[in-house]
Amino acid sequence: MAESKAEPTMELLLWRHADAEDGIPDAGRALTRKGLKQAKQVAAWLKPRLPSDCLILASPAKRAQQTAAALDLPYITEQRIGVHADINDLVAASNWPTRAGTVIVVGHQPTLGRLAACLLSGEPADWTIKKGALWWFSGRTRYGDTQTILRVVVSPDLL
């Protein structure tokens, strides 16, 4: 049986910001003590699994910036993935599924959950990604068809 010919993979990681304070303005809400712990737990699991050339995109909201900073790696503040982003904004910012390599999007609900639903089912739906959780997808093209694979879901309460 012939092996299938697969093109290079794109890795897309959707990381919801960790637990944050209530308040206004929304963009200025900081992580709570619990949120800082969540971000560090997920970052400790994630960092040794990342390639050195991964691209990290973080929402400009303070809580997303703090979550991304837990990795202690350079990241880019990306306006398109802020609190009012939609699925198309996240796809455009990450260049899913055509970019080669690994992209981490540190963002918000409900957009991250809607994108996860769309990637797995082909339709946006209101799926929930828990605070601080990470969903890791691979995208590849095999025989001309784009395939999406859910590789892992990591929740800080299980680490």
Image: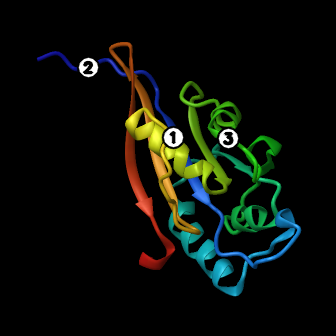
- Which residue type does callout 2 highlight? Ser
The residue that label 1 is drawn on is 11
Viewer-nearest of discs 2 and 3: 3
Task: Please name whichever residue, 63 or 26, is drawn nearer the observer in this view of the structure.
Answer: 26
User: Residue at the location (50% across, 74% down)?
Assistant: 156
SS assignment at label 1: strand
SS assignment at label 2: loop
Task: Please name whichever residue, 113 or 2, is drawn nearer the observer in this view of the structure.
Answer: 113
Task: Please name whichever residue, 13 or 28, is drawn nearer the observer in this view of the structure.
Answer: 28
Label 2, label 3: how far apart the Cα atoms are: 34 Å
* Position of residue 28 measured from the top left corner of the image (x, y, whole percent): 87, 68
SS assignment at label 3: loop
The residue that label 3 is drawn on is 86
Taking 3 as reference, is 45 above or below it? below
Label 1, label 3: how far apart the Cα atoms are: 20 Å
Per the rendering, the mark at residue 4 is 2
Q: Quadrant of residue 32?
A: bottom right
